[in-house]
Amino acid sequence: MRYLVGRIVWALVILLGTTWITFAIVFVVPGDPARVVAGPRADAATLAGIRRELGLDRSLSTQYGRYLWRLAHGDLGRSYANRQPVARTLAHRLPATAALAGAGLAIAIAIGLAGGLATAPFAGRLVDRAALVGSLAILSAPVFWLGMLALYWLGFRWRLVPLGGAASLRHLLLPALVLGIGTGVYYARLLHTNLQEVLTADYIRAARARGVGPVRLLAVHALRNAALPLLTIIGLDFAALLNGVVLTETVFHWPGLGRLAFDAVLALDVPVIMGTVLLSAELVVATNLAVDLVYRIVDPRIRLG
Amino acid sequence: MKGRLDRRAVTPLLGLVVLASCFGDPPLAWPPRAPGSQRGGVLFLAAPDDVPTLDPALGYDSRSWMYEQHLFETLVTYDDESRLVPQLAAGWSISDDGRSYRFTLQAGVTFSDGTRLTAADAVGSLERVLDPKTRSQGAEYYRGIRGAADYAAGRSEHVTGLAAPDATTLTVALDEADPLFLHKMALLFAAVVPADYARRLGDDFTDHPIGSGPFVLREWRRGERLVLARNPRYRRNDRPFLDGIVEQSGVDSELAWLQFLSGEIDVAGIPSADFPSIRRAAAAERPGRLISGVALVTNYLGFNCAMPPFDDRRVRQALNYAVDKDDVIALLSGRGVVATSFVPPGMPGYTSATRGYPYDPERARALLREAGLGAGFATELWTQSSDLDLKIGQKVQHDLAAVGVTMTMKQLAWSSFLEAIRQPRRVPLFDLAWSADFPDPSNFLDVLFQSGRSDANNHTFYANPTFDRLLARARPLTDPAARNRAYAKAERLLVDDAPVLLLYHPITYVMLQRRVHGYALHPLLPARFTDVWLDPEPARDQGTGAGS
């Protein structure tokens, strides 16, 4: 119990630090949020009025103090750009990003399993080499290029998926594919290597001696152990994906958190920048905390850690 | 061992299924079209980003205006030739001293919620724009109304210069005569909203807008789609033709073009690379109907006239001669005309008398030698981070190198760029465009080059007392011919002084599906959909269109 309280306090300290650093960075970059709200044409009087209304004429520490005070009351403020409550916008955007990250991860796992299993029996041979080169090519392909190419062929020429938009689960397919394919080939290589190692183990040899067929040997006996390190990585990757979909969301104009953050930074929309950064930090902190707690529950050996 | 890992992988996956299920749009239903009828149907559009706002007190960009002008109405507006015509007003009169206006509103107009639109709403709408709490970018246009300053400062409950003696009469008293006041009343900032309702909603009015325009907001899922539907209470029975408008957001221009080719959307801009072949095929109306219009816009490079070497007029003129503007037009695939004056053609006060600066590198070198810069100099062009700005920047770089000027480029995000060019001695050269708010030369010349306005939009820090005097003489004139003559005189001095490197006036090209009729580009306003109608095509509305 004491451990839990300690961890939660520490998590709050991290979040507080995040707000402070983000706030400081936003105000150090050149650009005047009031000017962005006022637009390129406003005269000095309009600008001054807007600055006063937003409280931007106060000192930085006053502004930060006010922000924290409202935050403590659960108020993330309103966007400077579209005047929407930030909390409502985040609640609207999070499912889109989670769906994209989840679907991307599912595709990555599928590619990883299929690729790893298919290439494992051919280690060192031509098929394996070709798969390695192919994986490298996909890993190095820029998301923008991959995205446009996929849209043109899969969406426009073959009409398999809708051309952009986020109206339904069908729209999810293409961005998820582009997001997942790079991670997928990485998983495939990882699984491939692990399988090589496991296939030399004594229990595999024993199974083979018992007359287990080659497919069952690979997909059941070997995979079970070879996939363990992969599963650990997948757990960590999900949090990273939630925060790392900015590029994919930008290419496909997916209405998620990544694009929200990107647009907010360009528009110097301080409340939205603060909100997205805070939510991302919260997701990472919460994931870590949850993983640690689960570890302690299922593995008593690290309970003292 | 196995159990532990499985649980960790399964929990987030379960969460995902739950999240994914609460996401996705319900389909939209539209009434069926009567066969052969001009009426009915839905126009499908696409845009890269969300509409910034639907609150007429706040929007100050063509995207917001495009939709605001269909939800709301102003007392006066522009016809297709940019002449002022009544909209909500039945008529108006102006006192001889030009300081009092009396508008008579059309009788029997209602808002889309069924409440009556009265002159008191018109008063309240203007007060809402002037209220500092609204943070309206348009407040400055109405500060000339008597008592506006006291009201904005909180010293009075109402603006004394605004009154509604009865339900259909609005009177406005100005501090001094303002030849532009009717233009200001045509801006969407002055749209009539249900004033009490709008005040009660505050920042949320944009999500639940109520107006008297031809359409109402049916749905707005930010980042996904915006849907307008016909306003059944619109004051004209014969308009609009369309049942609705659906704009899908999150579609960049390349993707929009693919959607257009697939027949998913009705209107699209044309990607640069495709433009030449499209124009050649225009007569065949393939893949659609091409329409175009010269926008009241000037694209230019601004010199910082307070920073050497651009404080020397000869250097500014030299650079104007050094750039081959025809090449710039070629870069635009012909979608522009060379600018020879700052006020664009089609705008009142435009003068064809200035020749601008034809391409003449010899003359450029001679002027630089005269200015003592025969050996050349180095400078930096600040631009926004768009492909076109970059391409034009590189072209200018190349031409300037030929006369010995070394130019580097610095690309910035819009907000940082805007802030930088306002600093008095920071940016030597910048890339910008200016578009007209209303058809009057003052909208270009006073706003950008008057010496007292360096705190607002005079980014070139140009200051010439003679020019200021010419502006002051032109500003109060109400006779159009005399006014335009006076501004043309100021403009000739300006072009000669060259605080800017004149580039071009863009031409907008838009492709329409052949089923679309009555769609026109307006020089001043975004496209209007009130007169748009579609070929009866019953099969399509249940077809592939976004969300249908």
Image (cartoon, coloured by chain):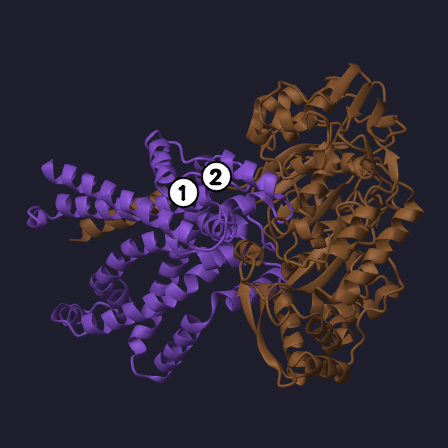
Horizontal side of residue A266 vs B4, given as left or right = right
Residue B205, percent from left and from top: 60, 29
Other residues around mark 2 within 10 Å, as few (<14) / some (14–19) / many (≥20)? some
Q: Say whether mark 1 and mark 2 are on the same chain.
A: yes
Q: Give the answer, above or below, for where A140 lies relative to B266.
A: below
The amino acid on which the numbered mark 1 sits, given as a three-letter code, is Gly
Q: Indicate the quadrant where residue B388 lies.
A: bottom right
Residue at left 36%, top 49%?
A: A24
Chain that the image shows in brown:
B
Chain letter of the residue beneath label 2 in the structure image: A
Residue B32, percent from left and from top: 77, 35
Residue at left 17%, top 69%?
A: A204
Horizontal side of residue B508 vs A279, given as left or right = right
Dot 2 or dot 1, earlier in sequence: 2
Q: Colour of chain A?
A: purple
Residue B434, percent from left and from top: 71, 55
Tally of numbered tags: 2
Chain letter of the residue beneath label 1 in the structure image: A
Horizontal side of residue B146 vs A137, given as left or right = right
The amino acid on which the numbered mark 2 sits, given as a three-letter code, is Thr
Residue B33 shows in this picture:
no
Other residues around mark 1 within 10 Å, as few (<14) / some (14–19) / many (≥20)? many
Residue picked out by circle 1: A275
Residue picked out by circle 2: A89
Horizontal side of residue B65 vs A223, given as left or right = right
Q: Give the answer, above or below, for where B504 lies relative to B85.
A: below
Q: Are marks 2 and 1 in contact (CB under 8 Å)?
A: yes
